[in-house]
Image (tube, helix red, strand yellow):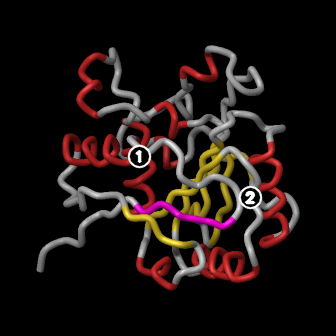
Amino acid sequence: MGRAKFTFTRLKYRSGDWNTDQRMPSNILNSLIEYTTIPVNLQEKVIDLGSSELFQSPFTYLSGHKLVQFDTHEAAYFKKYVQNGGFVFVDDCNHDIDGLFAKSFEAQMNSLFGTGVLKKIPNKHDIYHSFFVFEKGPPTTSFELNGWGDDLVHDYLKAITINGRIAVLYSNKDYGCEWDYDFRNKRFLAEDNTKFAMNIIMYAMG
């Protein structure tokens, strides 16, 4: 039997703006083909957070700039999903720890899992060595270096860890926008900035 294909699954939620960085998924899928032997579905899949399809997706992505306020159904499914082995990569497109997305998403996680549940992960964490090696932890983005958002370089990611594994990986670094270009333009980069996405996916699927 062949290996199951990897699907880049984006979560659609009722509040806020979930449909960000639309070229990013195809770029990530191109990198998976380039660097790994994982079979991939070539099209991004979008599912409602309140849909039972969620539980068929081992890897999901959630992003936005605006308010994150799950309805009762979405909140219950999100909690059940991550407690049953699902993985969510959450990316703050504002790159701003005091922005609306960050404040509302973190409040949502505190409400679902307990105050302070999102914790900084050490830069020696397995996720930084799961495929490529990032000795200094999460790579910086051009938006951080150019003073976008809160004008800080965030030298950490946060996570909700369940049973010793990351279930929710949370970034204020705006990776989605950093990776939002046509995959054919990667050849012009001195260093392919999507490599860290390979680590996230390989960790999630491991």
Residue type at numbered disc 2: Val
Tag 2 and tag 1, C-beta contact below 8 Å = no
Q: Quadrant of residue 6?
A: bottom left
Task: Tell me the residue at 48%/60% (across/down).
Answer: 10
Say left or right for 78 vs 87. Answer: right
Please rate how many residues cluster around mark 2, counting C-alpha atoms within 10 Å: few if below 14, some from 14 to 19, many from 20.
Answer: many
- Number of numbered discs visible in the structure rendering: 2
Closest to the observer: 177 or 202? Answer: 177
Q: Quadrant of residue 27?
A: top left
The region drawn magenta spans: 9-14
Determine whether the residue tagged by mark 2 lies in a helix, strand or loop. Answer: loop
Q: x and y percent of residue 150 in the render?
A: 77, 26
Looking at the image, residue 177 lies above or below residue 47: above
Q: Which residue is mark 2?
A: 68
Q: x and y percent of residue 112 in the render?
A: 79, 72
Q: Quadrant of the N terminus?
A: bottom left
Q: Quadrant of residue 154?
A: top right
